[in-house]
Image: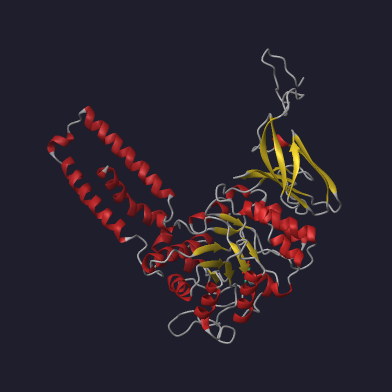
């Protein structure tokens, strides 16, 4: 074993230099390999020298069968280790055990306030999160978005909280937030500036992460504006996010605090669902949301192809909620909220809480929907099983998929979306969902009316689903379906009796 590891430690620098240039940037001062890993490496080097020394003995060059076997297996092991290193882009301690396992729930300032934020608004909103019962159902993050700082760093190079909007500083603010039982999140950017041209964190990653944690923040939304030139970065979007991930890991190692939760905000550029879970716990999948129905259907349409990508510790972020904002109707807001929750997106409220309506609160506090989003046992999202209004797999930005299902710890979840401008019945065969067993019947729980709606056998029909409305159901196995059901297979294709009679012809 020692010899095999020694070969990997010998190969590693070469592979690192050739194919992982982003690992060698110098803005982050702390070493990215822990001391323990380093000493492990050098003892392996010693083992390696010792072993290769013995191969130089005269007797080593005699080809006995066992020497040939040993040579072949060492070569194979070296090759496999090299391949593993080639596909492993970051140190394993960047994976943040225990941080961000479930989708984040809380508040974000952007949709409600844009740049008009200050300590008073944030503290009033935090108090309302508590008094309106939103923290009780799980919305515990209070996240500050863009525009909280001065436009320039101070002489030491640190970001400075805006002096008039945050006169008592960030520690005061986060102390108040923590006293309410909430956690606090902050925002920065992977470029020179944020999208509103406040300081970004490029080349200041470790300094800023350290400062954010000293200020009392445990969550970082990280944006994608003001991108440095290629001859500065020599890397793409992914590399800029790797820099902050490594800074977070590095600062955590030196501070002893858990790593900050990282929310990548690069609007779905470069397919983050394929790589971002190496660096953070959520990644935006689209451009910015707006408080109107066509934004909701557009985001749904784009996400319907990638909803497989969410699971524990890594979530498609469909953007901050618009429930309670703009011109979304009650039905549209319910559909928006249901889809975001069941697709395991972070749920960040951004309504004006001092004037929030009871309808908005009723939607945001639907505990049966939230329970699916925060399922501690099943991390995956609902996915479409039939498109409905257009051809399967075909994008139509006004008509995302109609029929969706997924697993949960308590049964199979169904989501039916009526994207039409008039009410309609929505019917499906239960076994269209891969999470349903043929030959069984299912009890039906409606997650919006909060009622048990009888037993479904083979099919289910939701009647008169309102225009732009949603149905959310939880189906639980209720035993074998009644005897003598005909036809004998719910799915007729190649349905055959034991004696060879085909039922489908
Ligand atoms: C955008 C981001 C928004 C908000 C805004 C702030 O890039 O998508 O959610 O953070 O920047 O300027």
Say which quadrant the N terminus sits in.
top left
> In which quarter of the view is residue 151 placed?
bottom right
Q: Please, which residue is most extreme toward the left here?
A: 58
- Which of the two residues, 421 or 217, is positioned nearer the viewer here? 217
Residue 263 shows in this picture: yes
Left or right: 30, with 274 as reference point: left
Q: Quadrant of ligand 1?
A: bottom right
- Which of the two residues, 274 or 308, is positioned nearer the viewer here? 308
Q: How far across and how far down the image is residue 178, in percent?
A: 53, 72
Left or right: 173, with 476 as reference point: left
Query: Which residue occupies 77% across, 43% down?
Result: 388
Query: Which residue occupies 55% across, 74% down?
Result: 177
Q: Please, which residue is most extreme toward the top here?
A: 499
Q: How far across and how far down the image is residue 389, in percent?
A: 79, 45
Q: How far across and how far down the image is residue 257, in percent?
A: 41, 66
Say which quadrant the C terminus sits in.
top right
Residue 192 shows in this picture: no
- Which of the two residues, 208 or 272, is positioned nearer the viewer here? 208
Left or right: 165, with 59 as reference point: right
Q: Is residue 249 above or below residue 203?
A: above
Left or right: 498, with 159 as reference point: right
Q: Is residue 281 above or below residue 195?
A: above
């Amino acid at each position: 074993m020692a010899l095999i590891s020694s070969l990997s430690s010998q190969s590693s620098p070469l592979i690192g230099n050739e194919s992982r240039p982003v690992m060698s940037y110098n803005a982050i001062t702390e070493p990215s390999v822990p001391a323990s890993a380093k000493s492990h490496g050098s003892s392996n080097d010693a083992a390696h020298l010792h072993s290769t020394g013995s191969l130089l003995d005269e007797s080593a060059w005699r080809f006995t069968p066992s020497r040939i076997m040993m040579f072949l297996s060492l070569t194979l092991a070296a090759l496999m280790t090299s391949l593993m290193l080639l596909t492993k882009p970051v140190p394993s301690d960047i994976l943040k055990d225990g941080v961000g396992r479930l989708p984040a729930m809380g508040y974000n300032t952007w949709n409600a306030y844009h740049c008009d934020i200050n300590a008073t608004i944030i503290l009033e909103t935090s108090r309302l999160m508590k008094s309106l019962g939103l923290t009780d159902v799980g919305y515990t993050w209070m996240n500050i978005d863009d525009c909280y700082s001065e436009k320039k760093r101070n002489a030491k190079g640190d970001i400075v909280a805006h002096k008039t909007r945050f006169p008592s500083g960030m520690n005061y603010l986060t102390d108040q937030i923590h006293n309410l039982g909430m956690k606090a999140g902050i925002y920065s950017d992977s470029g020179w500036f944020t999208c509103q041209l406040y300081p970004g964190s490029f080349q200041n990653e470790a300094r800023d992460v350290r400062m954010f944690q000293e200020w009392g923040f445990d969550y970082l939304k990280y944006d994608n504006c003001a991108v440095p030139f290629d001859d500065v970065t020599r890397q793409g979007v992914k590399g800029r996010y790797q820099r902050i991930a490594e800074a977070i890991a590095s600062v955590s190692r030196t501070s002893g605090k858990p790593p900050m939760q990282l929310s990548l905000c690069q609007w779905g550029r470069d397919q983050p669902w394929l790589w971002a879970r190496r660096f953070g716990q959520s990644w935006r999948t689209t451009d910015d949301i707006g408080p109107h129905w066509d934004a909701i259907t557009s985001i749904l349409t784009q996400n319907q192809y990638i909803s497989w990508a969410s699971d524990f510790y890594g979530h498609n972020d469909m953007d901050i909620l618009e429930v309670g904002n703009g011109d979304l109707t009650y039905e549209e807001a319910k559909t928006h909220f249901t889809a975001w929750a069941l697709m395991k997106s972070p749920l960040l409220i951004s309504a004006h809480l001092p004037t929030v309506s009871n309808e908005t609160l009723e939607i945001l506090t639907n505990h049966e929907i939230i329970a699916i989003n925060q399922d501690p046992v099943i991390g995956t999202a609902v996915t479409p099983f039939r498109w409905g209004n257009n051809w399967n797999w075909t994008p139509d930005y006004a008509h995302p998929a109609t029929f969706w299902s997924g697993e949960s710890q308590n049964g199979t979840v169904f989501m039916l979306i009526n994207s039409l401008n008039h009410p309609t019945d929505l019917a499906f065969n239960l076994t269209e969902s891969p999470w349903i067993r043929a030959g069984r019947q299912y009890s039906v729980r409606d997650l919006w009316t909060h009622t048990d709606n009888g037993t479904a056998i083979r099919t289910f029909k939701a009647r008169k689903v309102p225009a732009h409305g949603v149905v959310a159901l939880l189906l639980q196995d209720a035993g074998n379906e009644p005897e003598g059901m005909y036809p004998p297979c719910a799915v007729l294709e190649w349905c055959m009796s034991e004696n060879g009679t085909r039922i489908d012809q």
